[in-house]
Amino acid sequence: MSFGYNFKKITVVQPAKEFIDSTLSKTQRKTPTVIHKHLPISRIRGFYLRKVKYTQQNFHDRLEMMLTEFPRLEDIHPFYSDLMGVLYDRDHYKLALGQISTAKHLIDAVARDYGRLLKFGDSLYRCKLLKTAALGRMCTIIKRQKANLEYLEEVRQHLSRLPSIDPTARTLLLAGFPNVGKSSLINLLTRADVEVIDTPGILDHELEERNTIEWQSVTALAHLKAAIVYIVDISEQCGTPIETQIALFKKIKPLFANKPVCVMLNKIDITPFDKLTPENQEMINDFLKTEGVKFYKTSNVSKEGIMDMRNAACDELLVQRVEAKLRGRQADNILNRVYVAQPKKRDDVERPAVIPGNAPQLREEADARPKIRTERDIELELDDEYMLDLRKTWDLKNAEEAADAIPEIWEGKNIADFVDKDIMEKLAALEAEEEEREKSGFYNIDVEMDSDDEEIRELAKVIRRKRKIRKLEEKVDRAPIGRAALPRKNDKQLEANMKDLGLGEHIERGRGNYKESIHRGRSMARKRMKNNDGDAMDVDGDSGSLARSKSRNRSQSHVRGPARNQSGVRPAEVAKAEKLRKKAQKTINQDSRRGEADRRFLDKKPKHLFSGKRGNGTNDRR
């Protein structure tokens, strides 16, 4: 709601039993649960004192939130204050909130008293009893508020269903007897730029005898700054005579003070005003003269007079709002800053208005000329039923075909290709013109080129042609299935491919640019030489490269020594160390672990995750 109250956001009020259970459960979950009697007495006192204070704070916060969210009748708009007094009994509502506030203070006092007693507890047993007594007294206080909590929950549900009415907005208020046409009228006024409120029907009896539904209407009439639309059913189909409807208007007239009032003579489609009995006509005319209000003859079925009545009521409401603002202090501050410039005469020469002689004639001709019915006129005439139709202006041989759906594809052909009948002739003429331009050299570029440029240009043409052929061959050849490695191409294959592309001579000229790569594979002869030669380094003949590779390997990697399980162990103690290793591995194998670094938990419910108090955090150990 724009005026600051949103009754739909009030928190649900739990019954007394659920209120107590949820609070004690939260205390159990949020505070420690294990204490031992051998611990120092100060720690035991603090353990139970924490539970008492935590429970008291939970009760205090929830009751305080309840008191804050429910509206105070003194702080809200008088319309809502009186409406709540009508619907829920003002005294009962204030008494319920007052008892909730008293319960909050009592719980605070209980926690304060038992906190003092706990400071003098000399054993775990006495501290536990004091804690139990404190929580029990708090729960007893809440149990006594059972009826109040249930009543406040009913009020909350009813408040959430109340309509969102802004008492400060421009409003049209419909009033009258039941079945005079208020609900039908509100359906017709949904597009109005104001709030429209349909009040329940009011019967003609004393103010003290009115029921709750009628009091809602009286409350709205008294407190909302609205334009009053009083509806009179002149056909008397509502079951109430016209005389009784006029008498009701005079009874509730004091509620219309300082508000614009319109009287709506409804249902003229059933009984026109001219066909009323002379007594009823005279009664209505006298009523309108004595009360000094405007009346409108309307019909909810034919919509006759509805828009005129709506516009007049909105204009009167707007004028009243403007006058109220001008009477305030803010208008004086604004007017003091506004300067209105008045034009002054520059000389004494009279300059009368000049109207051309043929102007009256042209105006008469314009009035006599038939008026063209525009699309805007049609829209205003049809109102909500107006639909913009752009196809009605299409120039077709058969006007009935304008509403037909146009397909995109017809008999396998695109409709857009056949929109222009001469499209093929135009395309042929365009292609002929393009051929003539190519023959005449229109696209040739006159640039002087030497022999090198000509050679490069011819070579580029050859490369483009070969590239196109290669792409076509790749599309024809099937791709290798699986992950088979493609054979590596050597320099001979590269030269052959480049000769096919016309670059053979350039490859032969640049042969010195090849980089010889060392073959990474090792032949059996090399392995044999290594086995025969041992660790010796030969520098003669072919053994030089082998020696260099050995020295390189030593520099780039560590010197391989004995295994880790044998390094630092005497040969006589190797068997003993192996025996100890197997014995230590036995416990690891029993735990189904692969080694010392294996941190897997194969137990589906490890005790450290499923025993004791569980916190608010995640329970996923991953």
Image (cartoon, rainbow, N blue to C red):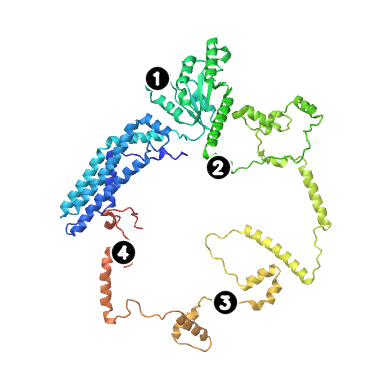
Secondary structure, mark 4, is loop
| Residue contact at pointers 4 and 3, CB within 8 angstroms | no
Q: Which residue is disc 2 drawn over?
A: 333
Marks 1 and 3, Cα distance to the nearest angstrom?
Answer: 115 Å
The quadrant the C terminus occupies is bottom left
Marks 4 and 3, Cα distance to the nearest angstrom?
Answer: 48 Å
Marks 2 and 4, Cα distance to the nearest angstrom?
Answer: 87 Å
Q: Residues within 10 Å of mark 2 (few under 14, many from 20)?
A: few
Q: Residues within 10 Å of mark 3 (few under 14, many from 20)?
A: few
Please tell me which of labels 2 and 4 falls first in the chain: 2
Secondary structure, mark 1, is loop
Please tell me which of labels 4 and 3 falls first in the chain: 3
Q: Which residue is disc 4 drawn over?
A: 593
Secondary structure, mark 3, is loop
* Residue type, mark 2 in image: Asn
Residue furthest top as drawn: 278
Give how far across and how far down residue 342 sits, in percent. 68, 40
* Residue type, mark 3 in image: Ser
Marks 1 and 2, Cα distance to the nearest angstrom?
Answer: 47 Å
Please tell me which of labels 1 and 3 falls first in the chain: 1
Q: Nearer the viewer, mark 2 or mark 4?
A: 2
* Residue type, mark 1 in image: Glu
Q: Which mark is residue 517?
A: 3
Q: Which mark is residue 206?
A: 1
Q: Is residue 450 left or right of residue 156?
A: right
* Residue type, mark 4 in image: Arg
Q: Nearer the viewer, residue 394 or 417?
A: 394
Please tell me which of labels 2 and 3 falls first in the chain: 2
